[in-house]
Image (cartoon, grey):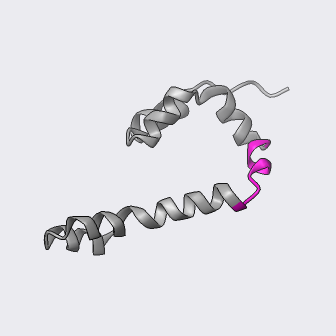
Amino acid sequence: MPVAMYMFWQRRWRLALLVAFAPSIAVSYALMRWIDLELYKHSLFGQYLAVYYDPADASAACGGRGDTAARRVVAAPVAPKR
């Protein structure tokens, strides 16, 4: 990110945006495309997210409102152990 900030400072906007966001987009795409994430989906944390993390929170997190969504997930009640 410091490289992108320097490029913003130098007013090289397009290159700065590319450097800032391209790596995370590429890694996210690669993870979703080639890595089997079913183990995480069926883990205890995955089940917890399925119950307490609704689509509105997911879209808020993807839209840059991660602070609000994270607060709602942390504040959600925990199911009692059986």
Question: Count of labels shown?
Answer: 0
Residue 60 is drawn in which quadrant?
top left
Q: Residue at x 48, y 62 (%)?
A: 24
Relative to residue 57, is residue 41 drawn left or right? right
Residue plotted at (55% across, 64% down): 27
Left or right of 19? Residue 39 is right
User: Which of the image's four quarters has the N terminus?
Assistant: bottom left
Camera-side residue of 13 and 71: 13
Taking the view exactly as shown, the residue that stands out farthest to the right is 82
- Residue 14 in the magenta stretch? The answer is no
Residue 79 falls left or right of residue 77 = right
Q: Quadrant of residue 2?
A: bottom left
Identify which residue, 27 or 69, lies in the foreground.
Answer: 27
Q: Please tell me in which quadrant of the rendered image residue 14 appears.
A: bottom left
Question: Which quadrant, please, contains the C terminus?
Answer: top right
Percent x, y of residue 13: 21, 65
Whole-percent x and y of residue 33? 67, 57
Q: Position of residue 80 (x, y in %)?
A: 75, 24
* Span colored in magenta: 34-42
Is 82 placed left or right of 28 in the picture? right
In magenta segment, residue 37: yes
Residue sitting at x 48%, y 38%: 70
Rendered position, 3 above or below 71: below
- Image coords of residue 39 (percent x, y): 80, 50
Q: Residue furthest front?
A: 14
